[in-house]
Amino acid sequence: MSTNNNGQSFYVTTPIFYVNDAPHIGHAYTEVAADVLARWHRQRGEDSFLLTGTDEHGEKVLRTAAANKTSAQEWTDKLVHDSWLPLLETIDIDNQDFIRTTEPRHEANVQKFMQKLYDTGFIYQGSFKGAYCVGCEEYKNMADLVEGSGEYNGQDVCAIHSKPVEQLEENNYFFKLSEFEQPLLDFFEQNPNFIQPESAKNEVVSFVRRGLEDLSISRSKEKFDWGIDIPWDDSHITYVWFDALLNYITAIGYGQDDAAFQKRWPATVQIVGKDILRFHAVIWPAMLMAAEIVPPTQIFGHGWLLVGGEKMSKSKLTGIAPNQITDIFGSDAFRYYFMKAIAFGQDGSFSWEDLSARYQSELANGFGNLASRTLAMVRKYFEGVIPSPASYTEADNQVINVAEAAVRDADEAIDAVAINEAINATWTLVDELNGYITSQEPWVLAKDETNRERLATVMYVCSEGLRVLSVLLAPVIPKAANKLWAALTEGKLGALSDQPLNDAGTWGQLTAGITVSELEVLFPRIEAETAS
Ligand code: MSP
């Protein structure tokens, strides 16, 4: 067996979430995807680090706090503790850090970064006149706006929030984004995987080709003051996106612990929703280039969870809270469903019917039942002791080949951030094993003592197949995978977290003689009324 530490470092980030409201399943979707990737790489033995956190400054958060008659700090503290940290438990996220943009480790180092760009001439003072969407916290030009309807009839509204934009006229500081037009295009060309998927990349490249304007990166304190002071001019605060993007480096030591920073940076992959792709694929690498820091290796833009064809959102009252789903189906099913049902990178619609149907057919009947009946048969026919296999037949070898291919294909899919393909590859083994049990009919073999050897082989093949599945499924449905691992291995093969994923397809790791224990039902039956 290869060692479980190949020395590679994997650093994945989620966007940091606005704390103007509680999370909905669209936010949870981003978290789960990043967590599956992080767990997968950790399961390979890599030094895998998942960063998530909250974006706490800006007008949007300040206005929400005011509307709730509290200070911005009190409001953000409350939402982080009551809603955003509990989300991580609800959907079983194993993050290595959680950064809040109001923490000193962030604020102080944002100021260092700003000062550096000011000193090197990338920031200058100018005047800004134009439109701003507080919902997006973004400066907008006419091309970003659409005609409003209903109460906003006749007005220009933000295409995402369907609400009127505000007209700003301020003396602000600007970042020389326009200077990075060509360097960015060169960078995209030299690093063809920097923006993924391909459709997202094309969108960004044509956006940059149309020309970049300098970006206002401060707001006057005359308007509001919930942000990080501009270090050389305390009558201004930092534009919330300039502040927020820097979380990816301040969390890992930028400005204060160079060794820690060098160890993790550049990030391997930064997961973002497609609505915030331009910030991450244009402004962010330009900021880093200005500071002479290499950009991240990849920005992956995923699609939206849609309701009625539109992005699910709390502001449009279409948000579903993650625990509405996990309270019924559990965190594993939540994770599995969203990762399997939607091709990562494309939009998808959530439906309770689809979730219930997949829960029943794929998780409960497909995988759960395979696990429980295999262990039940080992108990029934071999007193719970995993038997030694005798010689393998063609059918057995077929399972072995499918297992090997499933591991290889799933692992390759993860490198392409094709999470649903990794799950599909894993399911080829679930289906193969279910078909194998049907065709080998162990319950028929058990009736005749002369078939004892054959029965032993069949039960070994099924049990060893389950070992492979536990490892492959650990990043996606960690609770079920750990329960199965505990029941199957009696602790004799070490912890599930120590099983190198890329070696999981090597057949024969489960040792005969292990006594299996009872497996609690992995995906219990859900009454139809509860799930609708
Ligand atoms: N605070 C900024 C990000 C700053 S990162 C330096 C932000 N926050 S957000 O809370 O509005 O959104 C966070 C993430 O949730 C984004 O990636 C966004 O795409 C994602 N989603 C919000 N609604 C979503 C759906 N309906 N579907 C899928 N993802 C969605 O933007």
Image (cartoon, helix red, strand yellow):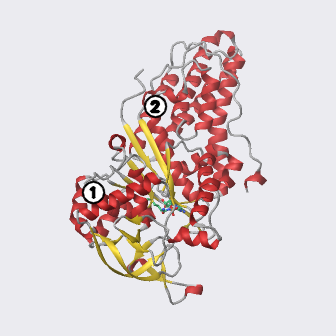
Is residue 182 found left or right of 101 in the rendered image? left
Give the x, y percent position of residue 358: 63, 48
Q: Which quadrant, please, contains the N terminus?
A: top left
**Can the viewer see residue 433?**
yes
Q: Judge whether 219 appears above or below 284 on screen.
A: below
Mark 2 falls on what kind of element?
helix
Instruction: Kindly identify which residue carries mark 2.
Output: 501
Q: Amino acid at mark 1?
A: Ala
Distance between the alpha carbons at the discs numbered 2 and 1? 38 Å
Q: Is mark 2 within 8 Å of ligand 1?
A: no
Verify CB contact (< 8 Å) between mark 2 and mark 1: no
Quarter occupied by residue 332: top right
Q: Nearer the viewer, residue 58 or 166?
A: 58
Mark 1 falls on what kind of element?
loop
Instruction: Kindly identify which residue carries mark 1.
Output: 291
Q: Residue at x 65, y 71 (%)?
A: 69
Q: Which quadrant, please, contains the C terminus?
A: bottom right
Q: Judge whether 287 appears above or below 47 on screen.
A: below
Q: Judge whether 402 appears above or below 192 on screen.
A: above
Q: Amino acid at mark 2?
A: Leu
Give the x, y percent position of residue 205: 29, 64
Q: Residue at x 30, y 75 (%)?
A: 125
Residue at the far top: name it: 450
Q: Residue at x 36, y 49 (%)?
A: 254
